[in-house]
Image (spheres, grey):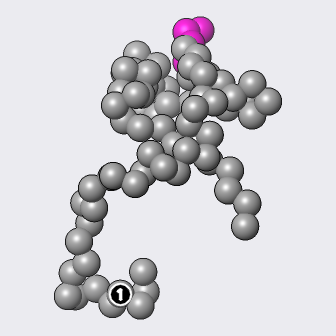
Amino acid sequence: MFDHAFILPYKDFKDFFSPELLDESHRWVCNIRANEEMIRLSHGGRSKTRPLSVYHNAFHLLQDVPAYLRPSPEIDNNLL
């Protein structure tokens, strides 16, 4: 199995995804160039970039994430 993901912790990116860069649908539009490992957020002629190399396949950053969803007795766990 091949993993290819960028783990973006909220604490590191909460200021990056700013309201002034939301598009008309109230969404952020980003591009990630794998060869440069940079994320670029842009809208309306404005943009921000940030390096991503430390976040590429950084699954170790998920180890201490709290479990917000607890299994419910009404949910068939076989379907999860």
**Up-down: is 2 above or below 73?**
above
- Residue 69 in which image quadrant: bottom left
* For residue 36, side relative to residue 51 (left or right): right
Q: Is residue 74 visible?
A: yes
Residue at the spot 41% in from the left edge and 90% down from the top edge: 78
The relative height of residue 27 versus residue 40 in the rendered view (above or below) is below
- Is 45 inside the magenta-drawn segment? yes
Q: In the rendered image, which residue does mark 1 sit on?
A: 77
Q: Secondary structure at mark 1?
A: helix
Q: Residue at x 75, y 34 (%)?
A: 34
Q: Nearer the viewer, residue 26 or 5?
A: 5
User: Is the stretch drawn in magenta largely helix, strand or loop?
Assistant: strand
Which amino acid type is marked by label 1? Asn
Vertical comparison of 58 with 43: above or below: below
Number of numbered discs overlaid on the protein picture: 1
Q: Residue 51: give x, y in percent of width and height.
A: 60, 22
Residue at image position (20%, 88%) is 73
**Quadrant location of the N terminus in the rendered image:** bottom right
Q: Position of residue 13 (x, y in %)?
A: 42, 28
Front in this rendered view, residue 66 or 25 = 66
Percent across and percent down for residue 43 are 55, 18
Compared across the picture, whether 12 is left or right of 29 comes to left
Which segment did they paint magenta? 43-47
